[in-house]
Image (spheres, rainbow, N blue to C red):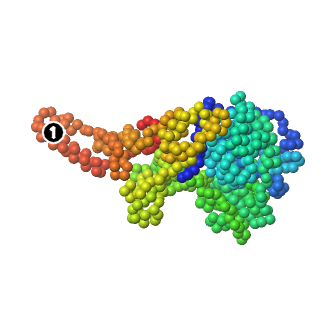
Amino acid sequence: MWTLTGRSCWHRRVLLSCATGPARPQLPRFRPAASHGDAAGSWASDRLCSSAGHKEKPDTSRFAVEDIRNFSIIAHVDHGKSTLADRLLELTGTIDKTKNNKQVLDKLQVERERGITVKAQTASLFYNFEGKEYLLNLIDTPGHVDFSYEVSRSLSACQGVLLVVDANEGIQAQTVANFFLAFEAQLSVIPVINKIDLKNADPERVEKQIEKVFDIPSNDCIKISAKLGTNVEHVLQAVIERIPPPKVHRKNPLRALVFDSTFDQYRGVIANVALFDGVVSKGDKIVSAHTQKTYEVNEVGVLNPNEQPTLKLYAGQVGYLIAGMKDVTEAQIGDTLYLHNHPVEPLPGFKSAKPMVFAGMYPIDQSEYNNLKSAIEKLTLNDSSVTVHRDSSLALGAGWRLGFLGLLHMEVFNQRLEQEYNTSVVLTTPTVPYKAVLSSAKLIKEYREKEITIINPAQFPDKSKVAEYLEPLVLGTIITPDEYTGKIMVLCQARRAVQKHLIFIDQNRVMLKYLFPLNEIVVDFYDSLKSLSSGYARDKAYSVGKTICERLKDSLPRQLFEIAIQAAIGNKIIARETVKAYRKNVLAKCYGGDITRKMKLLKRQTEGKKKLRKIGNIEVPKDAFIKVLKTQSNK
């Protein structure tokens, strides 16, 4: 199985990983194991009731700062993050132990259908260790690179991470990427080797990989089977012993960081917050540092894993807050909330995500424009890494140009629009941005800068007015079994990649680093990597243009006049196809007679068709654009 991961920017690190063997099937998440009711890991006697029953308001005031641990679970795709989260929820009594506990924190329909996590989810766990009760705030994060912005935002609310590695697959691409996210944030890292119950598991080999790549001593690794629950209690103990409590001050004025948010049509914006200073409770008046608007807090609480209202939230804790924000633009990810009349220095917030895949999005029917606009606004509140620019097309009408972190990100966003907001859209072929250094003084004056970024192919300036074009490059890392090294190097060279580094991470696995043009890998590099093909030829403009013209010719219905379909680069036509016209036999009733009569009828027909071409309208089927603009290997 080959896996493509990474995230895009003009000069960024993309990580690619490959491993042999069949794809691992989705396994049952849990089988009841032995009781964990010993002193080291018993449930709190005054714990909340199980999620199946009624829950009382938890008293968050009884947890001193030194008894709080905030941590995330990070890993490569399908290394067992969500399964481990399920076991931690069961072990702490947050949910009942049942065979149906699979991806409990994956609440979105798209997550359950695809079997992946796309949205970070928070849960507050209450755990008794050596006679003391602790509050453990867990954040389960996505594993695919397209959702790495979710990971980076989640880490801002944490002091440590569980780095989960598959005992069979070993270190893979996103394992490396997520480790460095945690390392750069100066978080404590606890390596957890999962799936030790598998037949081909080799935890000792993975320990050596972790020590060599991350410089973490092999004795720090915890070997578990999240599926069976083996040694999972040791993970909770390590969280308490190795992850430091948050450094906060409860006597200072309130300072809360909004690290995520969702929209409820009845209650408005629900903000997930991490408190760095002070206390917040229902009835408090708070101010947004971003908008300077004042709100009254209607509800505060913790996620257990569902919303559980509490009397107060204290510094060091992670929870949610509802304050009557009815407009989606009022809740900004990275905003700082503080008490009215007690201004504070805003928290640093988050570095904006830099989308590197852009696509046009249009309603299938223009009468649905406002509904789609509202749906996009609400969904981008929940996924702030998507950028939105208004756009229009002669063929598709009014719409938007959306920026995503990758192709999977784009597909999931589109699927969520359909499932959560019942909207249908036309989504164009994804493209990457380019930069143009202008040479025309007129254009420089128009754009007010010499170097512009182009996210829409229709906005490319003429090459006669441009000094040079710049394309985005990515620094990619490929981890592969050594027997595939030669073929992968050929593939990379065919994609105009430049090799930067090669190192053996163990006896059988090689880490390659290449500088790739993003346009060469954004669409079909994953498939080429899987099949180890040599890629396409470098100059694709003619073949792509001809293919699109042919698809459109097959999709458009014939008319009474001829339709010319052309693909152009600037003013140069590079491909053309023609949809032939229907032709009525105007000579059908002419049995012999003078030839001039026949010529007159044919001339009149030709003039009529010529006039019709000027005034005629072509009704394009709704599915024609989807067929034409969708990336396909065939027509």
Q: Nearer the viewer, residue 28 or 364?
A: 28
Specify whether 387 is left or right of 556.
Answer: right
Residue 603 appears in which quarter of the rendering? top left
Q: Position of residue 252 (x, y in %)?
A: 77, 66
Q: Whole-percent x and y of residue 197?
A: 74, 31
Is residue 22 shown above or below 369? Answer: above
The amino acid type of the residue labelled 1 equals Lys
Write the residue at 42% across / 66% down: 445
Q: Quadrant of residue 255?
A: bottom right
**How many marks can you see?**
1
Q: Where does residue 1 sit, x and y in percent of width and height?
A: 60, 33
Examine the image and state in which quarter residue 392 appears. bottom left
Name the residue located 67 percent from the left edge and 55 percent from the top edge: 259
Q: In front: 576, or 99?
A: 576
**Secondary-structure class at tag 1:** helix
Whether residue 349 can be seen here: yes
- Determine crowd level at label 1: few under 14, some 14-19, many 20+ residues with C-alpha closer than 10 A: some
Residue, far top: 199
Q: Which residue is mark 1?
A: 598
Q: Nearer the viewer, residue 332 or 453?
A: 453
Outermost bottom residue: 341
Q: Is residue 404 left or right of residue 349?
A: left
> Where 16 falls versus 449 (above or below)?
above
In-front residue for pair 254/547: 547
**Residue 139: where, in percent of width, then height?**
71, 48
**What residue is at 44 percent from the left and 58 percent from the top?**
437
| Residue 425 visible, this orientation | no
Q: Is residue 313 above or below residue 568?
A: below
What residue is at 42 percent from the left and 37 percent from the top?
635
